[in-house]
Amino acid sequence: MTLAGLSIDRVETYAVALPTLRSFGVSGGSVAVAGQPSIRVLVKVSADGVHGWGEATPIPAWTYETAESIVTTIDRYLAPAIIGRPVWDLDAVTTAFDRAINRGLSIGAPLAKCAVDVALHDLLGRAAGVPVGVLWGQRRSEEIQLAWIVSGQTAEEVAECVAEGKDAGYRAFKVKIGLHSEEDDLAVVAAVRAAAPDAPLWVDANQAYTCDTALRLAARLLDLGVTAFEQPLPANDLAGLRRMRDVSPLPVALDESLRHPTDLATLVRLGAVDVAIAKVQRSGGLTLSRRLCQLAEDCGVRLMGSGLTDSDLGLAASLHLFAAHGITGPVDLNGRQFISSPYAAGTTVKITDGVARVPTGPGLGVEVDESVVRDLAVDVLVARA
């Protein structure tokens, strides 16, 4: 059967418990705890004997979707909306998603939508026998530099974290701030700079500050050689973001403010964005992420890349997107730092000295061992005592 003749006939969800390697927190709370499993929702989409895989990363400390909501949203709303549709018609799938779970002010249930959208891209690439970038006719790089994430509490912890990253070959660092007082946040960044004097360095506040606080910090962060200030303000503080762009000595990079390409269009019109962060899960998958990245390029907005502590499926999806748009790094794709992906068998993403190779296998280029997925699966809908 030709690619044009393939129709979606099954969508399956698996909430899997992956081993956590290190603890990790952001201003909203804990993301991963060493010794406790990290839940990811893997999605398998099938069409006439061909299948593809995608991933959702539930992090309630970062956004509102939980493992439970992702599973039920896909099983009860998104899957029924696309069964029987042609696998190639990604535009129609996006429309069906928006009708099943409406966007509201911005995109609705982006993590759940992302997992299915990415699985469809993987399926299309596998059916055609080519990597995702070849499907798009767009692959500008073969390697992408990664950044090591620093989320320490004290100067000593920070120095140890940086040393660990350097020992692993990483040469760029991203620092999570907004977890402490202003002075303590600055002390953490100063400790990173002391431990890595010449490394590319940027900070991410995950919406932690008011505009006045962020402007005070920006001047002092500039003195520490910080190159970008990521999401200093709440996502919907458009007036504050415009003021930041007008006054801040540091470029302001937006993440949580860019759920949908139309969010970027609004911020461009308002003159409130210096840098757009490309993040596959936040934007509901590869289809809308490509639209956002192309809009940024067309408007002259600089692109940076980030992930959501993804396992290997999400990591591969991000690498294909970034390679397509020439985002060579350093980028925040930190999944390998904090979790492992035992379901990824055979060919998977290769990282050497902090540099990731863009996969060359069909689809995402990640071989999934479904028997391991089933072994790792947990029922997140079981009522808790």
Image (cartoon, rainbow, N blue to C red):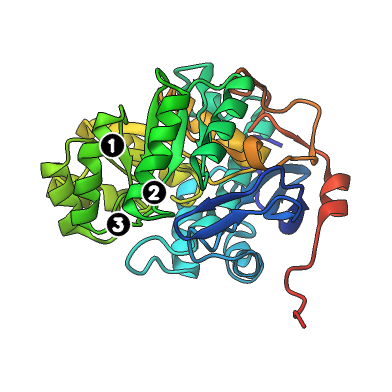
As drawn, 1 above or below 57 = above
Residue 355 visible at all: no
Looking at the image, do the residues carrying marks 3 and 2 touch, with CB atoms under 8 Å apart? Answer: no
Amino acid type at circle 1 is Leu
Residue 133 visible at all: yes
- Residue beneath disc 1: 221
Q: Distance between the Cα atoms at labels 3 and 2?
A: 14 Å
Q: Distance between the Cα atoms at labels 3 and 1?
A: 14 Å
Who is closer to the viewer here, 12 or 199? Answer: 199
Does residue 234 appear to the left or right of 19 in the view shown? left
Does residue 276 appear to the left or right of 358 in the view shown? left
Tally the marks.
Answer: 3
**Which of pointers 1 and 2 lies earlier in the amino acid sequence?**
2
- Residue beneath disc 3: 209
Q: Residue 383: image x %, image y %?
A: 75, 80
As drawn, 3 above or below 34 = above
As drawn, 192 above or below 114 = above
Amino acid type at circle 2 is Asp
Write down the quadrant of residue 80 in the picture. Answer: bottom right
What kind of element bears circle 1? helix
What kind of element bears circle 3? loop
Query: Can you tell which of label 3 and label 2 is closer to the viewer?
Result: 2
- Residue beneath disc 2: 184
Extreme-bottom residue of the structure? 385
How many neighbours does mark 2 have within 10 angstroms: few (below 14), some (14-19), or many (20 or more)?
some
Extreme-front residue of the structure? 156
Q: Distance between the Cα atoms at labels 1 and 2?
A: 13 Å
Who is closer to the viewer here, 353 or 343? Answer: 353
**Which of pointers 3 and 2 lies earlier in the amino acid sequence?**
2
